[in-house]
Image (spheres, rainbow, N blue to C red):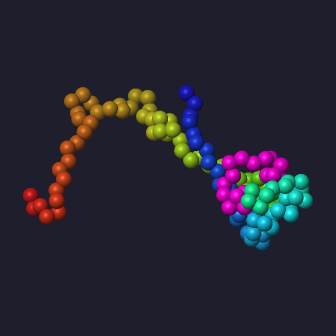
Amino acid sequence: MSEQRRIGYSWNLRQIMAQRNLWKSSDLIPLLRARGINLSESQVWRLVTGTPEKFTGRTFAALCDILECTPADLFEPYVEMQSARRANAPRLGDEPFPAAGESLTHRIRLVDEDDDG
């Protein structure tokens, strides 16, 4: 059985822009147009302020060219979640359950702060 993992990513466009003294999303519009990418102001704003789910490779390449950075500077993948079965599974031979006669549950007693007993 293969391991199950959920992959996320950090989108660093805003930080890279700030390092290059580009403070407004509208600053990117003419730079993108010069590279054949025609996006509306709202599309560019969402690209800068959010984490895009979909965009073209041409747009990604244009951003790297404009900002003189690598794809790894803009886009950093990471593991969000790993399946519990694989991550915390007992090793073969480990006893995953209590021995016969032992209880899985424990009784607890809730006591009010004012209760002395």
Q: Residue at x 84, y 55 (%)?
A: 38
Query: Residue 73 or 92: which is nearer the viewer?
Result: 73
Query: Residue 5 or 102: which is nearer the viewer?
Result: 5
Residue 114 image point, x, y percent = 13, 64
Q: Which image quarter: residue 88? A: top left
Q: Is residue 81 left or right of residue 55?
A: left
Residue 98 image point, x, y percent = 29, 33
Q: Residue at x 23, y 35 (%)?
A: 103
Query: Residue 82 or 39: which is nearer the viewer?
Result: 39
Magenta span contains residue 108? no
Residue 49 image point, x, y percent = 68, 61
Q: Residue at x 78, y 72 (%)?
A: 21
| Image: magenta residue range | 45-61
Magenta span contains residue 57? yes
Q: Is residue 104 left or right of residue 117?
A: right
Q: Residue at x 57, y 40 (%)?
A: 5
